[in-house]
Amino acid sequence: MMPEPQIQLKQRIARQFSQAAIRYDRLADVQWHIGVDAVNAMPDTQGLVLDIGCGTGRITQLLARRCEQVIGMDLAEGMARFAAQAHANSAHFVVADAEQLPLADNSLDGVFSSMALQWCLPLTQVFKELARVLKPGAKGLLTIMVDGSLKELHQGWQAIGEPAHANRFCSSQHLLESAHKAGLFCTIEEKLYQTWHNNLHEALHSIKDIGAGVVLNGAKTRLSRQTLAHLDRYYQNEFAINGQLPISYQVAFLEIQK
């Protein structure tokens, strides 16, 4: 199967998240907790800060309490529009691509992103853009899903002989190397987050219903009931604790400085 053209893939990601905007805040609990931790870990910054992948703007609003001026940016027009309506007093919101930032060289005092940049893998171009738009000495905090995320799903698909119907992610070491090549200084720390669900259907929909169901690098075929039943049995046998099924998010907290 030929790889999906990049522009079509980005359009599909943007469309899925746009459609999920109205329900996102109600469903995306783990993304909220990661975002709060990310804001708390953000280096103190004076001046203009960019929030890449701002989503509905609820994390941008928290960020704005710590920064003088914030621009919230998202690839999904529906997300940026929702954020502008809900949090207009916190930040200015725009639709843009992290790989083509609509900003002048050396114009940002800081950058922030939580749970968005894993959609831009590989991150080579994103880091180049950040090195371009950040002022010398400017800092930022990026949280990015890395290898180990969705590990239960990947193990399950492999065990039943199916190609992965879930995204794979790069290692923290790869993030460090990519950032260094772009001329950014950085440190990294990994944290594990888990959500727990009553059944496999609920676990899978915790990903799909927030717009994150686009598979970047795995199978794109529709799943039969029989296949899902096989996965359900394996998942229950291997991972259930007190009747609850986990989804794991291995998250890199990457602090960068130009």
Image: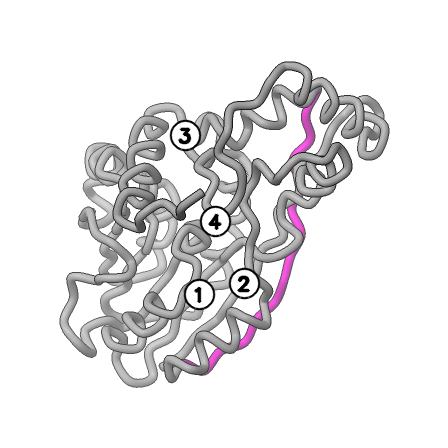
Q: Is mark 2 in CB contact (under 8 Å) with mark 4?
A: no
Q: Earlier in the sequence, mark 2 or mark 4?
A: 4
Q: Earlier in the sequence, mark 3 or mark 2?
A: 3
- Near mark 3 (Cα within 10 A), the count class, few <14, some 14-19 or many ≥20, is some
Relative to 257, 232 lies left or right: right
Q: Residue at x 62, y 48 (%)?
A: 149
Which residue is disc 3 drawn over?
24
* Quadrant hosting residue 124: bottom left
What's the CA distance linking mark 2 and mark 4?
A: 11 Å
Q: Earlier in the sequence, mark 4 or mark 1?
A: 4
Residue 216 in the image: state x and y as whole percent: 45, 45
**Mark on residue 35?**
4
Q: Is mark 1 in CB contact (under 8 Å) with mark 2?
A: yes
Instruction: Determine whether the residue tagged by mark 1 lies in a helix, strand or loop.
Output: strand
**Mark on residue 219?**
none
Magenta-colored span = 184-198
What's the CA distance linking mark 4 and mark 1?
A: 11 Å
Specify the amino acid type for callout 3: Tyr
In front of the other: 36 or 232? 232
- Near mark 4 (Cα within 10 A), the count class, few <14, some 14-19 or many ≥20, is many
Q: Residue at x 34, y 84 (%)?
A: 137
Q: Residue at x 29, y 33 (%)?
A: 15
**Mark on residue 141?**
1
Q: Earlier in the sequence, mark 1 or mark 2?
A: 1
What's the CA distance linking mark 1 and mark 3?
A: 23 Å
Specify the amino acid type for callout 4: Gly
Which residue is disc 2 drawn over?
253
